[in-house]
Image (cartoon, grey):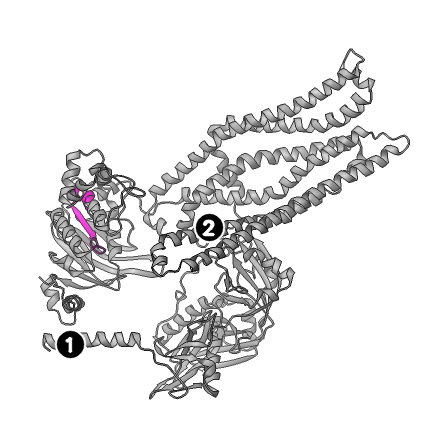
Amino acid sequence: MKNKELPAALLKELERHKLPAGEIEAYAECDFDLDFDYRKTYLFLTRKNIIFAVCPKSPERTYSGFAAGKHARFENKDIQIEEIYYFDLNETEEIFTVSYIVGGAVTLKTKEGEKALCICSNTCMKKLGAFISAFSKLKAGEKPDGTESAPEEEEFCPKCGAPYPEKGRNVCPRCMDKRSVFFRIFAYFKPYRLYFAVVTLFILVNAGISLIAPYLSGIVFFNQALGGDKDALELLGFKTDSFAFFLLVTVALILLTNILQLLFSVIQGRLVAHFVPRAVADIKNDVFRAMQNLSVSFFKSRRTGGLMTRVNDDANQVFNFFVDGVPYLLVNVLKIVSSLAVMFWLNWQLSVFAVVFMPLVFMVTYFMLPKLWHFYGKRHRSIRAMNSHLNDNITGARVVKAFGRQENEIGRFDKVNRNLRESEIKLVNFDIKFNMLFAIVIMLSGYVVWIVGGWLIIQPESTVTYGMIITFVGYVNMLAGPMDFISYIFRWGSNSLNSGQRIFEILDARPEITEKKDCVHLDSVKGRVEMRNVVFEYETGKPVLKGVSFSVDAGQMLGIVGKSGAGKTTIANLLTRMYDPLSGEVLLDGVNLKNIAIADIRKSIGIVSQEIYIFKGTVAENIAYAKPGCTKAEIVRAAVCANAHDFICRLTDGYDTVIGLGGHALSGGERQRISIARATLADPTVLILDEATASVDTKTELAINAAIEKLSKGKTVISIAHRLSTLKGADKLIVIEDGKVSEEGTHSELAARKDGIYQKLLQIQSKALALRGIEYDGAN
Amino acid sequence: MTEQTEIKDILKEQEETVEAMFGINYLTDQNAVFRRTDGGFVSLETNGAFYGRIDCYCAFPHTAPYELISVRDSDGKEIGMIENAEKLSGENREAVKEQISRRYFMPVIKRIESVKEEYGYSYWETVTDRGKCRFTVAAGADSVTRIGENRIFVSDIDGNKFEIEDIRRLKPKELKMIDVFL
């Protein structure tokens, strides 16, 4: 281990104790002593010793996530080694952890027995694992090379140190490039820019009108119309002295502004309803298209589950922000600035008092709104809990009745229901509190205006009038909205941009399986399949296939046998090029799959697997899935071959029966036969059967096997099975064990091999069945 | 070996497994000696067999931590059960109870100083029976679990667990801080 890999403080401490830092091959840090008190301890591995260094007890512990970024001040950087113990490497047989509910005890095994050194929490476990493998390597005479630990997954933002909110998705909402996301989302409005511009215009006009309203109802109405202001009359160019007329005009104007405001917001609302759903639909289409092109591995990675279901919410969230957020941000900033300007222009002393409480409005929202959202979230969770409880109860109705537990169920429901009630009450209480506080702050500002304004009016030579106070109160009320808005828009925006970012991640994901530009088009495939030394892993560092080689000649049948988890289905995945091998080659007719046009692979290699995809549609549509545009006669012929024709005809709607989600329910065997019919229709040269009959009863299995036999005539067949009976017709069998081909040969060759895995499997399956009086037909 | 005897062997093996599955071997003061080892573990001598290090798994860690303890060898295979650890005598009781408390150890939160939330995580500053603890909890319902009415387990982002023994003993201010998780 290079010195620079050790933290500086630790290195310094090692020097102080004259410990050979240069000889350290690996180290690990633990955090508890054997009494479960916080105490840093270190394990160092050299070629001679395991060095165990103990620091003094610590009164505190900061776990990961906290000791980062803005919390960095908590990170305890001083290391002070107090005691050092040496354990001879030659005498140490093993080092391991005795695991507890959380973490475990680090234990050393020597001739004398096992000795616990210290306790470590989960936080320290990862590094300890690497330390232990480095130790085993050293014991085995190899040199630890730093590959003992799986490449550390980045969990914390390198910039601010906060943990990433979603595992496996290295995006820090605080530090992400918000601007680029913003403009990229904005681009989705491009086709609708006219709408967007008009809507923004309406919003601005409306804001302008609302700005006039307080002036009209205050100064114009009270001071000029009611107060008989002749200058105002002249200024407006009215040729009459009638203040009654002036009054009428003023009222009419106030009415007009209200009507205009209403009208504009209606038009604006309709325009928004017109183009936002379209923009949302556009982006969803894009996401779906991107998803179809992505490789299977993308869907397998753990982050996708959440990602996919959230696409919908994300798209809505983003666009709502752009329609309800962005334009109003502009409006509200304008409103604040312009009303402040008008107020200060009218009377600066009164303005100062009017706005003195405004920051309070901001604060109330800023601090209370997130809490309000929490309560909403809580209610949402309660509702969900209740729904799932109801669902559970209804699906389990038979069990409930069978055990006579209705009363008990009622009690359980009451508990869930009570929870929901409590969260409703809490939400409403908080909502009321929030609104009340908000109203009080606004009212306070209003009262201040009344008091200070009134006091100013009664001062001699005052320019303040009653109308002005009305105007001021109007403006104060008008300021509250924008203040409120601005206090939460940033959080809202940040969430929305994060949603946008998630959408773009799918759009930007590059498919791992791509077609080469100069790929080969195979016109006629003979069907020879070969794997050469294939290595594959789903997760780095955990190889599933460790150098698999085999071949099947055209028209032959290969059986693949092995325990579950041995890598059989992975072979099927590679043969159909759902994944590419890490190293080695998969060949079809001697050509690497990577060099063949993907469409040709799909056409010539078919798969019937345990996983059956029946989409919502008629039986005929489901069968014709692989060959759009085929004739009805072809569909029926395929169904006949698949042993499915009979049951399909007995359905009331025949081939027009709608199946799939919400449609007619098919049994497992029936679904399987439909998928075989599909494969028959596609007529591939190479057929892969992945546990096609694993989950059906014996009678159905026979029917399916008969169908498969018909289908496989003249084809290369690779059949993966758990039950050996399925493989009785195989020309060759391979046994996969632990990611490798451990046995290869014909049935009789393998059955004759003493202590062979196949032979054992055969024994177990035939004997176990024989014991139960079931005739076994797998052994020919 | 003839076919007949082979089948008999298989049958016998199955019977044995079935028996082992359904029989419970209770460990008592009469048939078991638990001893603390120098290495910091507990050993067991029972029915002539000696186990250098045993583990105690609670069948009901939350509701009855000392009842029905599954005693397992270092490979995790069950040796037997203890009906009630409290009813063992002397060294036996102490050794088993200690082993349980080690396996199920988690710091107990005595005071909550602050809980701040930001971008999907909440940052807790607490005082536990082991000293001051600062840890990070992922947002979502799974991080804070309620055991019974008033007991709470909090898991941080690494899976470390902390316990609040009784939320009724928290101050109103503290309760308010964690209210959103309850």
Which chain is indicated by disc 2?
Answer: A
Residue in the image at 55% along x and 27% along y: A268
Identify which amino acid the numbered label 1 is placed on: Lys
For the N terminus of chain A, the image quarter is bottom left
Is residue B167 visible in the rendered image? The answer is yes
Which element is circle 1 on? helix
Mark 2 Cα-neighbour bin, 10 Å: few <14, some 14–19, many ≥20: few
Q: Is residue A514 magenta?
A: no
Q: Position of residue A458 (x, y in %)?
A: 88, 33
Identify which amino acid the numbered label 2 is placed on: Arg
Extreme residue toward the top, this view: A239
| Residue in front for this viewpoint, A298 or A580 | A298
Q: Position of residue A118 (x, y in %)?
A: 49, 76
Q: Position of residue A196 (x, y in %)?
A: 53, 29
* Residue matched to label 1: B8
Q: Eyeballing the image, is A766 above or below A358?
A: below
Q: Eyeballing the image, is A562 above or below A608?
A: below
For the C terminus of chain A, the image quarter is bottom left
Mark 1 Cα-neighbour bin, 10 Å: few <14, some 14–19, many ≥20: few
Which element is circle 2 on? helix
Which chain is indicated by disc 1?
Answer: B
Which contiguous range is marked in magenta? A676-696
* Residue matched to label 2: A384
